[in-house]
C-alpha cells in the first residue's frame, strides 16, 4: 500500500493523471489489469502543517512521542487525544510536522 498526499487544489488533476498512467501500464502489459487500485480519500483527511523555529517544542508539548518520528517518516500517534498520522518533514529548513487526521 502507498499513501500519496498532494495539494487539495490539484487532487482531481493528480488523480486523473494517476489513472491515465495506470491505464498506460495496463495497455503495455506492465501491470495486470485491476492490480492497481486508486482510492481518492481527499474528503476524508485534513492536514495541519506545523513548521518554524518553535515546531519541535510545540509538538513535544502536544505529543512527546512526536520527537521519536524520524525525518521523512510517519507514525500513528495521539495528539491532544486525537489519532493522527504524524509525518516529520521540513519545507522551511526547520524541523516540521504534518498532522493527518480524519475529516
Image (cartoon, rainbow, N blue to C red):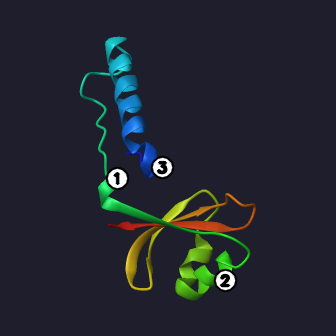
In this picture, residue 52 sits left or right of residue 1: right
Residue drawn 61% across the image and 56% down it: 72
**Front label number (2 vs 1):** 1
Q: Which residue is mark 1?
A: 42
Depicted 58 relative to depicted 18: above or below: below
Q: Quadrant of the N terminus?
A: top left
Q: Are dots 3 and 1 in contact, CB under 8 Å?
A: no
Q: Tell me residue 27's x, y (percent).
A: 32, 13
Q: Tell me residue 2's x, y (percent).
A: 41, 45
Q: Which mark is residue 57?
A: 2
Real-space Cα distance between discs 3 and 1?
9 Å
Mark earlier in primary sequence (2, 3): 3
Q: Tell me residue 80's x, y (percent).
A: 44, 85
Q: Which residue is mark 3?
A: 7
Mark earlier in primary sequence (2, 1): 1
Real-space Cα distance between discs 2 and 3?
27 Å
Residue drawn 31% across the image and 38% down it: 38
Q: Nearer the viewer, residue 92 or 67?
A: 92
Q: Which mark is residue 25?
A: none
The answer to which image quadrant residue 77 occupies is bottom left
Amino acid at each position: 500500500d502507498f499513501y500519496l498526499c498532494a495539494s487539495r487544489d490539484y487532487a482531481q488533476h493528480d488523480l486523473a493523471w494517476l489513472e491515465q498512467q495506470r491505464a498506460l501500464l495496463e495497455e503495455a502489459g506492465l501491470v495486470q489489469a485491476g492490480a492497481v487500485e486508486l482510492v481518492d480519500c481527499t474528503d476524508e483527511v485534513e492536514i495541519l502543517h506545523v513548521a518554524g523555529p518553535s515546531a519541535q517544542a510545540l509538538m513535544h508539548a502536544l505529543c512527546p512521542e512526536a520527537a521519536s518520528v524520524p525525518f521523512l517518516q510517519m507514525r500513528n500517534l495521539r495528539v491532544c487525544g486525537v489519532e493522527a498520522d504524524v509525518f516529520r518533514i521540513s519545507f522551511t529548513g526547520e524541523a516540521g510536522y504534518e498532522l493527518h487526521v480524519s475529516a
